[in-house]
């Protein structure tokens, strides 16, 4: 078997050359990292769950006209995606105060924000992804003013969609992070949602119990990360409920196609 060319390896994913020009294969690893890799563990089965949950969300976004890089899931750990030029920003949308915003501004975790707030962070591990303003983004050429407008309206659409999607399964969407890329089709460029959307990149609280169903379980040493991700998958109807809870890892069923 010929080895595929590896294009990029990140903390939780690897990108390989795809079968057609303009496509890539996105592989979901089991690695859990936090605090810019200062904390690292392998959580067996996490990649499989994130692949499936992200597929579910991206398929829905494609269907309702939110443009994404996602083409299809290939297997338990891989997705076929369109190759895009990643904009070097992490776009965070917050509905409820938590995490770094609570720390920075002294707003208690759990306080509902007066409105959804969008923040930009510059993607640079060596700088710990610093928060930046539109001034920095345009001055340093990471995105132009029109692109910033597009990023913000995309982020709000994703927030509205995800809020409803999670609400429907009894989960409150506290905040989340997206990454976007430029996709060229002939001479036309449009901005699409890239990367993944999963419990690694969202804060998700159970609406009844406030239990955390996201990566904060790992960041805060609470344990039960896999069980929490499995619960999210289960609520979306993605798990075979007859499967044993422990043992051979998650078994995923049901295709969206
Ligand atoms: N987030 C992420 N990747 C990052 C930083 C943040 O996916 O590198 C997500 C995080 O899971 C949360 C949201 O963005 O849903 C806001 O994170 P915050 O700024 O509060 O960061 P943290 O608490 O991780 O420092």
Image (cartoon, helix red, strand yellow):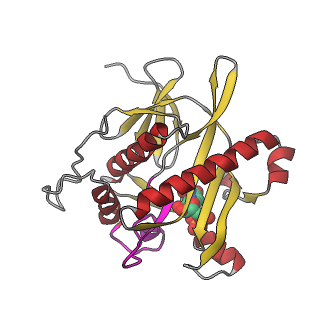
- For residue 159, what is the image quadrant? bottom right
Give the image location of residue 125, x and y in percent: 64, 52
Q: Quadrant of ligand 1?
A: bottom right
Residue at coordinates 52% horizontally, 44% vertically from top-left? 10
Number of disc labels: 0
Q: Is residue 85 above or below residue 111?
A: above
Which of 227 and 248 lies nearest the eye of the viewer? 227
Give the image location of residue 14, x and y in percent: 47, 39
Give the image location of residue 94, x and y in percent: 60, 65
Q: Is residue 122 above or below residue 34?
A: above
Residue at coordinates 44% horizontally, 53% vertically from top-left? 198
Q: Is residue 89 visible?
A: no
- Residue 216 sits inside the magenta stretch: yes
Q: Is residue 1 visible?
A: yes
- Residue 147 sits inside the magenta stretch: no
Q: Is residue 251 above or below residue 1?
A: below
Horizontal side, residue 72 vs residue 248: left or right: right
Give the image location of residue 204, x and y in percent: 45, 66
Locate the N terminus and report the quarter of the image it occupies: top left
Q: Main secondary structure of the magenta part?
A: loop
Which of 45 and 133 lies nearest the eye of the viewer? 133
Q: Is residue 52 above or below residue 6?
A: below
Residue at coordinates 60% horizontally, 46% vertically from top-left? 179
What residue span does the magenta drawing correspond to?
A: 198-224
């Amino acid at each position: 078997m010929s080895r595929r060319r590896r294009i990029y390896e990140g903390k939780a994913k690897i990108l390989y050359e795809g079968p057609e020009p303009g496509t890539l294969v996105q592989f979901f690893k089991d690695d859990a990292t936090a605090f810019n890799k200062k904390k690292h563990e392998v959580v067996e089965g996490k990649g499989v769950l994130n692949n499936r949950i992200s597929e579910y969300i991206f398929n829905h976004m494609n269907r309702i006209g939110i443009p994404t890089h996602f083409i299809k899931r290939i297997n338990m750990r891989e997705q076929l995606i369109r190759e895009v030029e990643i904009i070097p920003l992490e776009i965070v949308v917050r509905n409820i105060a938590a995490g770094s915003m609570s720390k920075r501004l002294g707003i208690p975790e759990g306080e509902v924000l007066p409105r959804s707030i969008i923040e930009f962070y510059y993607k640079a591990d060596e700088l710990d992804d610093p928060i930046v303003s539109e001034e920095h983004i345009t001055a340093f050429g990471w995105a132009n003013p029109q692109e910033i407008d597009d990023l913000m309206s995309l982020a709000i659409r994703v927030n509205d969609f995800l809020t409803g999607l999670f609400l429907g399964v009894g989960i409150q969407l506290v905040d989340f992070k997206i990454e976007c890329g430029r996709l060229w089709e002939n001479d036309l460029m449009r901005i699409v949602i890239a990367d993944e959307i999963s419990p690694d990149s969202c804060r998700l609280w159970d609406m009844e119990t406030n239990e955390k169903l996201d990566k904060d379980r790992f960041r805060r040493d609470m344990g039960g990360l896999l069980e929490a991700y499995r619960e999210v998958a289960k609520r979306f109807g993605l798990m075979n409920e007859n499967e044993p809870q422990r043992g051979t890892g998650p078994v995923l069923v049901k295709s969206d196609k």
